[in-house]
């Protein structure tokens, strides 16, 4: 039995797909019974490639299998399948446990609310029964949206497949939009994923707090403009940090007139009906509704700036003042950036048929009415969190929500002594349970400024008296009325600050014990004094001065920064919506629920791609969020390494996926994604090396534009629940569909250089611990078929197909290259910059270097000639 979806599509590909599945059972590792029943969930036609992407979901006895969604791409000219990805479950019939639920769907809502700690639902009402096993219930006091409940089969890690109730609950604080599967017989929570993706400040703590509030319904509606001027949208004006300016640190605001793109937004940014003339004079329109959410109510009646009949959004901005004083400027910038993201990526294929975000679909296509009423709700200065941002992506036809929070901007002002001056510090982020998912506690510097003399901690411990870890209970009168300097290490941040507070200190400075910065976190409800952390470098200078009997008077101060001016983070958040809508089709927002998923990487790529400048080079360091972290523009921001092709600065390879583990044994999706974004950024520069750079993000023809197209088309081709290898293969397939495969070798070189070569394996994409790294290129016959020699570009300095292996090593390394490099200098330097190996020769084939004479440690390998400048980190162990 082959069951098609209830959606009526113009072209019926049933027989094409059926034949393809049958002919590829061995390739997909499936049985005939596994492909007997499926339905089409999405069908997307691409104007650029003349290809239809069809997404099909596996069924059993008419019941969908969760996330068992395969993608089939069919060429229009001859109805040939040119690419496919499989996510069906093998031997499904033998793995299913039951066919009939014993748990009622309304009880599943209660069970889910309990498991998610959302309280007890009330007033549960069945609003609609669409078909067997598919219901719609009221919000029930736990959700911002009505609660759909559907019967599905949930595959589990142990290989079983259990009958479950699938339901989604949009949490009242707006932070999480849960999609959960409840066992339809036992009521146990089997699995959950969050449509709301949060991008925390760092991976050590969750840096947001939640404030649960009841939604208000009685606020004044936004101003509606009666249509008078049929060309009104042509004069709309916005004072914003215009692209490619990334933030206030990267440039100044510009007054833009009519910046909308007429292809993506033909009626301007304030239209919602497709008739010339704006409906709204506020920051609301077909693509985005930007508003203030400083009360955290998460409704759609927040304040929005009014541009008047002339649609002039030019508001004052003084970043030295409190954020609420410039709310209109912040909301305007958020509105501009969200619309810019809509318009830019529309050009590359994130359009209406693909499930983009619009209140009205101007383009008519089969099923166009299904994706309407889903413009982005963008909340500025959202009080539901701090030092964070998020984007919730429900399926096509439901409104996504972006929440932009304020960020700590803490300063340490030393008023006296040899170190007098202003320094950056990081405020603590203590919460009730230490996870970041409960209310913030402690005393934020912004609302608890303090000025006092410094004193160095001495807890009486003979070994580490400055760490404040003594449990002897000694009275420390010297701390009274002082700001206490404490070294990090050997006990928790909470215990250090608590000890100082118990001895009447008025503030705490924690000195990091490693390079870089750290945000303090932990569980406490008793800390009431402000505390900050500083870098090891600054902290040790302060300690040395105190030990030299200097009197140092210090002030804690801070005015929050507004994330709505960090264009890179807005682009990153919006990017989550793009990747979630394109992988697996717009009707499925669950395809990136596996540990090796790359959502954070695609989003970082979106951010750096649209903020490129002509003066950037491939070795320019590009960070994420350098404005809100108080770093220079070439800093790393909220990632471990900045994005650059220089492997001495960003040494990530595929094997580093295994290193992205948090303290609770879960995976850092930001860490995993950063590795993928590193590879995409290398690809971007490889393509620029071939085709040049074009600053026109809408209609340009440069290598950066071609990479943007590859990424969007690649997302449509990426299989559900894919890892690195699946995403790599989708990029290669995208090159075939877009450019006839002329860039195959260049793409292979880029991925092979970072360990995602031909023999690399993702293992189980649900795990981040079983990857197999490989630096090899495809076999000669594949390279020959792709005409590699025509695309090799040895003048693109940092992106040659060097393979250096094994690395780490203890005895030797191999250096190999596809093409010969004449008169090459090979040198190895230790961590102090001393040359420990040197050789000059032609490099062809494989060069073997004996490393047994080198001590254990980190080294830098450099290969140079007049055209090549290559470096890579070596680990000798």
Image (cartoon, grey):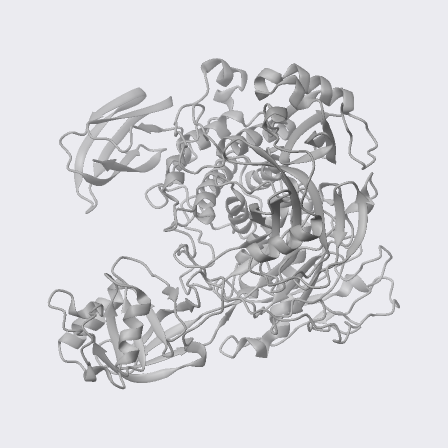
Residue farthest left in this picture: 462
Q: Which residue is found at the position 56% from the left and 28% from the top?
A: 732
The image quarter containing residue 759 is top left
The image quarter containing residue 803 is top left
Q: Is residue 75 above or below residue 42?
A: above
Q: Nearer the viewer, residue 847 or 189?
A: 189
Q: Report whether 130 appears left or right of 319.
A: right
Instruction: Report whether residue 253 is seen.
Output: yes
Q: Position of residue 217 (x, y in %)?
A: 74, 72
Q: Report whether 840 appears left or right of 101.
A: left
Q: Is residue 393 above or below residue 88?
A: below
Q: Which residue is found at the position 46% from the left and 26% from the top?
A: 792
Q: Is residue 214 above or below residue 653?
A: below
Q: Nearer the viewer, residue 484 or 870?
A: 484
Q: Position of residue 707 (x, y in %)?
A: 56, 38
Q: Quadrant of the N terminus?
A: top right
Q: Position of residue 529 (x, y in %)?
A: 36, 79
Q: Report whether 709 appears left or right of 198.
A: right
Q: Nearer the viewer, residue 452 or 821?
A: 452
Q: Is residue 516 above or below residue 668?
A: below
How many marks can you see?
Answer: 0
Q: Which residue is found at the position 31% from the left and 58% from the top?
A: 516
């Amino acid at each position: 039995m082959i069951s098609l979806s209830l959606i009526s599509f113009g072209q019926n590909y049933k027989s094409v797909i059926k034949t393809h599945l049958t002919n590829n059972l061995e390739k997909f590792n499936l049985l005939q019974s596994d492909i007997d029943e499926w339905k089409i969930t999405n069908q997307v036609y691409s104007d650029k490639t003349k290809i239809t992407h069809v997404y099909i979901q596996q069924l059993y006895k008419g019941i969908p299998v969760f996330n068992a969604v395969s993608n089939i791409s069919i060429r229009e000219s001859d109805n040939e399948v040119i690419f496919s990805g499989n996510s069906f479950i093998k031997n499904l019939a033998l793995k299913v446990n039951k066919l009939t639920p014993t748990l009622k769907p309304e009880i599943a809502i209660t069970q889910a609310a309990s498991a998610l700690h959302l309280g007890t639902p009330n007033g549960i009402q069945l609003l609609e029964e669409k078909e067997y096993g598919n219901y719609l219930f009221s919000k029930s006091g736990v959700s911002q949206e009505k609660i759909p409940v559907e019967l599905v089969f949930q595959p589990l890690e142990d290989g079983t497949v259990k009958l479950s109730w699938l339901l989604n609950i949009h949490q009242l604080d707006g932070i999480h939009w849960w999609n959960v599967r409840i066992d339809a017989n036992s009521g146990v929570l089997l699995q959950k994923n969050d449509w709301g993706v949060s991008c925390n400040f760092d991976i050590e703590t969750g840096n947001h707090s939640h404030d649960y509030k009841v939604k208000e319904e009685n606020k004044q509606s936004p101003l509606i403009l009666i249509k008078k001027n049929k060309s009104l949208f042509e004069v709309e004006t916005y004072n914003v940090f215009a692209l490619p300016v990334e933030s206030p640190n990267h440039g100044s605001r510009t007054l833009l007139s009519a910046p909308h793109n007429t292809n993506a937004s033909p009626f301007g940014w304030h239209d919602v009906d497709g008739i010339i003339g704006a409906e709204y004079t506020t920051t609301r329109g077909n693509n985005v509704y930007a508003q203030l959410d400083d009360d955290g109510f998460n409704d759609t009646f927040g304040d929005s700036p009014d541009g008047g009949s002339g649609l002039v959004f030019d508001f004052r901005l003084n970043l030295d003042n409190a954020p609420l004083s410039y709310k209109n400027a912040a909301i305007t910038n958020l509105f501009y950036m969200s619309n810019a993201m809509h318009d830019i990526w529309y050009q590359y294929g994130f359009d209406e048929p693909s499930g983009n975000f619009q209140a009205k679909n101007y383009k008519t296509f089969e099923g166009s009415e299904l994706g309407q009423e889903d413009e982005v709700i963008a909340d500025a200065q959202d009080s539901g969190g701090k030092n964070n941002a998020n984007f919730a992506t429900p399926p096509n036809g439901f409104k996504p929500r972006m929440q932009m929070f304020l960020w700590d901007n803490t300063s340490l002002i030393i008023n006296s002594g040899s170190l007098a001056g202003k320094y950056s510090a990081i405020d603590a982020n203590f919460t009730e349970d230490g996870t970041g998912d409960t209310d913030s506690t402690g005393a934020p510097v912004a609302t608890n400024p303090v000025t006092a003399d410094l004193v160095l901690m001495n807890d009486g411990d003979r070994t580490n008296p400055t760490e404040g870890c003594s449990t002897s209970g000694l009275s420390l009168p010297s701390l009274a009325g002082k700001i206490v300097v404490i070294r990090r290490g050997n006990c928790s941040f909470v215990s250090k600050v608590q000890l100082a507070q118990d001895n009447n200190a008025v503030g705490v400075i924690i000195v990091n014990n490693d390079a870089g910065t750290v945000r303090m976190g932990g569980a406490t409800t008793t800390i009431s004094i402000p505390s900050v952390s500083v870098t090891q470098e600054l902290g040790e200078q302060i300690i040395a001065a105190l030990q030299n009997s200097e009197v140092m008077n210090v002030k804690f101060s801070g005015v929050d920064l507004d994330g709505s001016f960090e264009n890179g983070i807005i682009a990153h958040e919006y990017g989550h919506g793009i990747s979630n809508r394109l992988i697996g089709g717009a009707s499925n927002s669950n395809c990136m629920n596996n540990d090796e998923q790359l959502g954070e990487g695609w989003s970082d790529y979106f951010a750096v791609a649209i903020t490129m400048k002509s003066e950037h080079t491939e070795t320019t360091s590009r960070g994420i969020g350098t404005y809100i972290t108080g770093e220079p523009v070439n800093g790393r921001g909220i990632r471990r390494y900045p994005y650059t092709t220089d492997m001495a600065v960003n040494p990530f390879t595929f094997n580093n996926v295994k290193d992205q583990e948090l303290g609770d044994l879960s995976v850092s999706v930001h860490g995993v994604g950063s590795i993928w974004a590193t590879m995409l950024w290398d690809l971007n520069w490889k393509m620029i090396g071939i085709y040049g750079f074009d600053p026109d993000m809408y209609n340009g023809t440069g290598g950066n534009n071609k990479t943007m197209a590859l990424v969007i088309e690649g997302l449509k081709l990426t299989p559900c629940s894919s890892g690195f290898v699946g995403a790599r293969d989708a990029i290669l397939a995208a090159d075939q569909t877009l450019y006839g495969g002329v860039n195959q070798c260049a793409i292979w070189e880029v991925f092979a250089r970072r360990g995602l070569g031909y023999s690399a394996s993702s293992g189980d994409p649900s795990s981040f611990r079983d990857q197999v790294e490989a630096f090899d290129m495809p076999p000669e016959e594949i390279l020959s078929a792709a005409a590699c020699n025509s695309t090799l570009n040895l003048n693109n300095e940092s992106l040659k197909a060097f393979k250096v292996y094994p690395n780490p090593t203890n005895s030797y390394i191999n250096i190999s290259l596809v093409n010969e490099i004449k008169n090459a200098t090979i040198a190895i330097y230790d961590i102090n910059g001393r040359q420990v190996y040197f050789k000059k020769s032609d490099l062809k084939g494989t060069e073997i270097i004996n490393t047994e004479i080198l001590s254990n440690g980190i080294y830098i390998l450099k290969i140079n000639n007049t055209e090549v400048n290559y470096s890579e980190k070596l680990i000798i162990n």
